[in-house]
Amino acid sequence: MESPGNGKVFSRLYVVVTRECNLACKHCYLEAGPGKAFENEITPAEVASIIDTVASDGKLAEVSITGGEPLARKDIKEILTIVLERGVLLNLETNGTLITPGIAQLLSQYKNASVGVSIDGIGHVHDAQRGRPGAFERAVNGLNLLQEYDIDHGISTYVTHENLPQLEEIITLGIETECSIFRILAQTVPLGRSGEKPTDVTLVEKTLQAYFHLKAKYLDDLRIITDLPLALMPAENIDDVQEYVTCPWWKLMGVSPQGDVSLCTALSLHPDMKAGNLRINTFEEIKRHPMFKILDQSNKTSLKGVCGNCHAARICGGFCRAMAFAEFGDLLAPYPMCQAFYHIGKFPEYALIDPEKDCRYP
C-alpha cells in the first residue's frame, strides 16, 4: 500500500474488524449479530498495513477498533497489540460481555489503551435493547475487570424512552466502576436495524434536560458529555457547556471488515459510500475520491438547510455527516435532528445567522 502524498490527512481511523456479534441490538446500523461475520475479513497484517499507511504523515492520533463485537474475533489480541505497539491511542468499542482477564491483562500493559462499554439501561432494559438476556450482568462483569486492571474506560448510553429514567443509575454504575467518562448518545444513524427516522423531538428535549441536571449534580464525580447539537442547547445552559463533543468528519476514515474505505463506521458498509478498497486501490487513489473532496474542511461552510444558516455550524461542522447522508442522501445535507427542530418551529432563533431566511430542506 502506498503512503499518502497529497494534502488530505486523517487523524482518526475507525476499523470495523468484524460484523460478528454475540448480541443483536435494536439500534445497530450495521445489522451485526451471531453468524454475521463476512468471509475473508481483514487480517491482522492488513490492519497493521492500514494503520502504518494512514499514520505515515504523522497526524494519526487515534484508532478505534470496533464491530460488530471486536472481541468476538479469535485473533483480537493480535489486532489490539498491533495498535498498541504503534503508540497511537487505542479506543476499543465493545459491548463488554466478552472482556476476559486475558484481554484486560493485555490492555493493562499499555498506557495508550481506552475502552468504551455500551450500557443501554439497567437489567432487563439493557437486555431488551441488546437482544439477549443476561447481557447487562456480563457487561458489568466486563466493567469490573477494567476497573480491577486499572484500564481507562467509559460508558456510552444510547438514549431511549425506556432507559432515560435510568440514566442516573447508569451514572452510579460508572462511578462505582471508576469510569473516566459517561457519554449520552442521543441519536444513531438510521441504517440497518435502527428505525430512528424521523427524529424523536420529545425524547431529545427530555434528554437535554436530563443531561444538564445530571452534569451539574455529578460534576465532581464523573465527566459527562453528550452528542446533542450545540445549537439546540438552551440559552440558559450555554455557559454550562465547558466542552463540546462534535464529529471531526473532515479528518476521519472508516474501514469495513472487507477493506472498503468510507467516512466512518456507520457508512463503511453502505454501497454508495465506498471510496475504494485497501486490498485493490492505492491509498492515493482512495484519497482522491470525490467523497473526500466533498468532506474537505472548507465544506463546513457549504452545508445545506438549517446548518447553512447556523452560527454553531462553524464549530460543529453540521455534526454527523453519516446521519445526514442516511436520511437525505447528501453528505452536505443538514443534520437531521436540527432540521427536525427547525421544521416544527423549535430551532432556537438565537442560533440562526439570518432568522428571516427560509431553511426548509429538501
Image: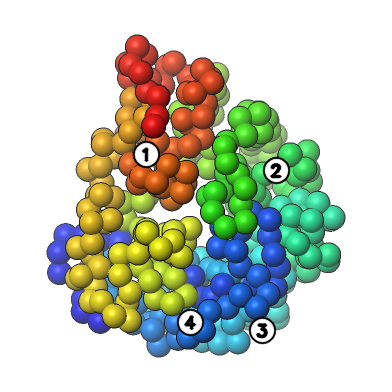
| Disc 2 to disc 3, C-alpha distance | 33 Å
Residue 139's place in the image compared with 224, above or below, is below
Badge 4 or badge 2: first in the primary sequence: 4
Residue 147 shown left or right of residue 262 in the figure: right
Badge 4 or badge 3: first in the primary sequence: 4
- Per the image, label 2 sits on a secondary structure element best described as loop
Q: To which residue does mark 4 refer?
A: 41
For discs 1 and 3, the disc positioned in front in the rendered view: 1
Q: Residue at x 46, y 65 (%)?
A: 269
Which disc is residue 160 wearing?
A: 2
| Disc 4 to disc 1, C-alpha distance | 32 Å
The answer to whether residue 41 of the structure is visible from this angle is yes
Viewport quadrant of the N terminus: bottom left
Badge 2 or badge 1: first in the primary sequence: 2
- Per the image, label 1 sits on a secondary structure element best described as loop
| Disc 4 to disc 3, C-alpha distance | 23 Å
Q: Position of residue 87 (x, y in %)?
A: 40, 74
Badge 1 or badge 3: first in the primary sequence: 3
Tell me the amino acid under the disc marked 2. Thr
Where on the picture, by quarter, is residue 274? bottom left
Q: To which residue does mark 3 refer?
A: 102
Question: Which of the pair 108/298 is nearer the observer?
Answer: 298
Residue 147's place in the image compared with 297, above or below, is below
Q: Residue at x 19, y 71 (%)?
A: 284
The answer to whether residue 71 of the structure is visible from this angle is no
Question: Which of the pair 72/10 is nearer the observer?
Answer: 72
Q: Residues within 10 Å of mark 1 (few under 14, many from 20)?
A: many
- Per the image, label 3 sits on a secondary structure element best described as helix
